């Protein structure tokens, strides 16, 4: 990870602005936090690759003056795995919607975690399919409305943190677009972490999730994030009843275990090959 002097603008592809996101969309907050984490780590833009799937979240790579790939819906981790194996020196940040990561891409998500390949997966969780018009997603909470669940969702939602932990991700954190400093800090920790990292960020979609559920505008949705979450260090002080309807935030795992490209390099070298990670 080469580190040289960079300000925020050196990471931005300004010719692509303004962004495609609706006014007040949380994806803009996440984009800003990713940029801030690059600046804090003083990463060289030429050593970074930002990848996206398809969806409003998947547009993120368009706005970075780094290597970038806009891939297919649900398959971004497969592209990222290939890219990391081809060039293990790259710092790869993968941006995924909740539909992208937990529905069509759920298989790639759990296997990337199982392999512990050194990628940073940022899960933009707005609880809905944004780009295609507000359909129900595997992250839509019970009883909430979407264009395809107008009378309330009857399917329980995945908890992406539990899923990532069970599948073997070695850095797992959750925060919200309300908590800007935590977003930038967790993304930075995830980038530095030598293994598969997942940062779930609860994000607001005022256009669909907010409107269809009568939750108000973007500011109301930010307040909603704040009042329906609780920091992990506060949990011991709370009762089970206090936790109902509140999602825990924080770092849930930060541990080291063998990383995939390093293991692959060892295997290749043992067979007389020249692959290095
Ligand atoms: C193989 C495939 N299936 C379906 C689609 C249609 N599609 C595009 S984006 C999207 C969902 C986007 O929702 P999400 O991943 O949650 O991201 P958001 O737009 O909310 O950021 C879908 C279903 C597609 N492009 N390709
Ligand atoms: S539809 Fe929702 S997720 Fe997509 S840009 Fe608009 S507010 Fe953001």
Image: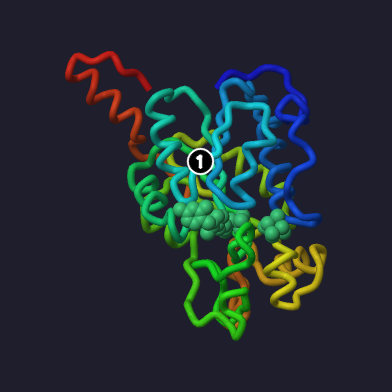
Residue 196 seen in the current view = yes
Position of the N terminus by quadrant: top right
Note whether 29 is above or below 235 in the view shown: above
Q: Is residue 81 left or right of residue 94?
A: left
User: Is ligand 1 less than 8 Å from the beta carbon at label 1?
Assistant: no
Q: Is residue 260 left or right of residue 173?
A: left
Residue at the extreme left: 271
Q: State which quadrant residue 263 falls in.
A: top left
> Residue visible at 44% across and 43% down?
77
Q: Position of residue 205 (x, y in %)?
A: 70, 62
Element at label 1: loop
Q: Position of residue 183 (x, y in %)?
A: 67, 48
Q: How many marks?
A: 1
Give the residue pinned by disc 1.
Answer: 71
Q: State which quadrant residue 130 falls in.
A: bottom right
Neighbour tally class for label 1: few under 14, some 14-19, many 20 plus, Cα within 10 Å: some
Q: State which quadrant residue 267 falls in.
A: top left
Residue 100 seen in the current view = no
Where is ligand 2, by quadrant?
bottom right
Residue at the extreme front: 132
> Residue visible at 49% across and 60% down?
160
Q: Position of residue 186 (x, y in %)?
A: 61, 45
Residue at the extreme bottom: 151
Q: Position of residue 57 (x, y in %)?
A: 62, 50
> Residue visible at 38% across and 45% down?
112
> Residue visible at 74% across and 56% down?
25
């Amino acid at each position: 990870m080469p580190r040289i002097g960079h300000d925020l603008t050196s990471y931005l592809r300004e010719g692509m602005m303004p962004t495609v996101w609706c006014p007040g969309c949380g994806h803009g907050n996440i984009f800003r936090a990713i940029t801030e984490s690059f600046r804090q780590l003083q990463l060289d833009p030429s050593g970074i690759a930002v990848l996206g799937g398809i969806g409003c979240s998947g547009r993120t790579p368009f706005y970075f003056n780094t290597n970038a790939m806009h891939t297919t819906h649900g398959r971004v981790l497969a592209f990222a795995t290939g890219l990391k194996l081809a060039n293990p020196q790259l710092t790869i940040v993968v941006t995924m919607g909740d539909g992208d990561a937990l529905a069509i891409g759920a298989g790639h998500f759990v296997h990337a975690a199982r392999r512990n390949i050194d990628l940073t997966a940022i899960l933009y969780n707005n609880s809905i399919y944004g780009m295609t018009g507000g359909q129900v997603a595997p992250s839509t909470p019970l009883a909430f409305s979407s264009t395809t669940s107008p009378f309330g969702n009857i399917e329980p939602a995945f908890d992406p943190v539990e899923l990532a932990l069970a599948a073997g991700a070695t850095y797992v954190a959750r925060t919200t677009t309300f908590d800007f400093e935590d977003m930038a800090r967790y993304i930075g920790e995830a980038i530095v972490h030598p293994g598969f990292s997942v940062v779930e960020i609860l994000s607001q979609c005022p256009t669909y999730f907010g409107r269809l559920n009568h939750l108000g505008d973007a500011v109301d949705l930010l307040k909603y994030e704040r009042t329906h979450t609780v920091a992990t260090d506060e949990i011991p002080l709370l009762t089970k009843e206090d936790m109902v309807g509140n999602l825990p935030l924080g770092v849930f795992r930060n541990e080291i275990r063998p990383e995939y490209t390093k293991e692959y390099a060892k295997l290749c070298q043992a067979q007389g090959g020249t692959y290095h990670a």
